[in-house]
Amino acid sequence: MNFDTVTVRVGEADTAVDITVYRDVLSAVSPYFRSAFEGPFVEATDRSISLTDVTEQTFRMFLQWAHSQKCQLSNGAAFPQHGILVQKSTRKNMEQTTTGSAELQLPLRTSSSPNAETMPDTTAAIDEHDDYDDHRSMVTKALGQLYHANPEWIHGYRLSLLSFLRLYIFADKYNVPQLRDDILTAMIAQSHAWNWWPDIERELMKSAYANLPPSSKFIRLLVLSTAYCWLLEPETCSATRMRTMMEMNAEFAFEVIVVQNQMLKNSRSSGGLPLWLEDAVPDSCTLHEHLVQDAAQCRKRIRDQSHILTGLIEMCAADVVGITKESGEE
């Protein structure tokens, strides 16, 4: 690795922060930064660049992700998969309700397990639905009962989606294709772990459509989760929800209707059997661009380096905690 450094100034002029970064770290993951610092541009001469539309927190999250590409545990073991991340204030409630936190640990084989190389790998990857694991199903059901009806949990979850979105917008604008794929994987992994898929929220949708192209895979995930989960909840009227979507964004509502029509066709052709989101998104590769790695390489990376994805989830969770503290919320 070349140890040449560059300076990245992030934020508006009055609050801008200079961050010193290894040039190769940026160039390795982003054609945008590689062109800026290695091409015939003033940034290459000055060895600095200004990103006025990026917050310090978002840029540092990006840097942490970039450095994590080569990070492994010292003993060579894989990081835990299917980590169930909950807000600190609600974790205590869960521990009081169960007989102990050990019940929430999913027994998964890591690369350091005996005969790990010869044993067949039947464990679902972090972004795959594992419906044959009874223990996992029990944990998922318990989480649903404890958190999904908790307004504080819902608020924190929506803040985490905004954190994912800010990072995705950065990756889209500054051409970090692998980060875009990884964010989608992290979101899908989190959704499986919590049994809770993204639902529409005015601020999230407004920001997504204002900063991303309508064809964005991030928006596509919102469309699919809305069509398969949010719109079909039995407790509410789907027509009322459709009107709500139309008021928020007519283009989004149209895409949801298209997906629902396709669901209806598939249901009829399969004998009227219900279809679930897992049918449309069996894993995150369904939504990946695969501009850096092909599908086979991507699946291997997700299994072997799941710490990169859990790291993204943890960063967004930490971002939510920071936002909550700044706003003075308890």
Image: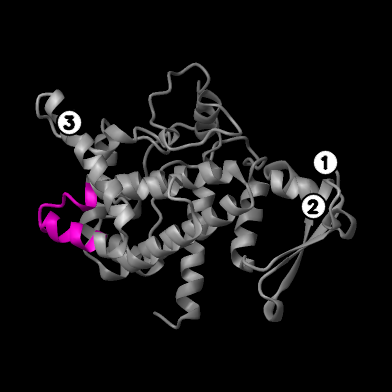
The residue tagged 2 is 22
- Residue found at the far top of this picture: 118
Residue 52, image x, y percentages: 67, 68
- Residue found at the far right of this picture: 45
Q: CA distance from mark 1 to mark 2?
A: 9 Å
- Residue drawn at (40%, 80%) of the image: 329
The residue tagged 3 is 265
Q: Are marks 1 and 2 in contact (CB under 8 Å)?
A: yes
Q: CA distance from mark 2 to mark 3?
A: 52 Å
Magenta region: which residues?
229-245
Q: Quadrant of residue 90?
A: bottom left
Residue 259, image x, y percentages: 26, 40
Q: Horizontal placement of 58 versus 9: left or right?
A: left
* Dot 3 alpha-carbon crowd within 10 angstroms: few under 14, some 14 to 19, many 20 or more: few
Q: Earlier in the sequence, mark 1 or mark 2?
A: 1
Q: Earlier in the sequence, mark 2 or mark 3?
A: 2
Residue 135, image x, y percentages: 27, 39
SS under mark 3: helix
Q: Horizontal placement of 221 versus 134: left or right?
A: right
The residue tagged 1 is 1
Q: Quadrant of residue 55?
A: bottom right
Q: Is residue 229 visible?
A: yes
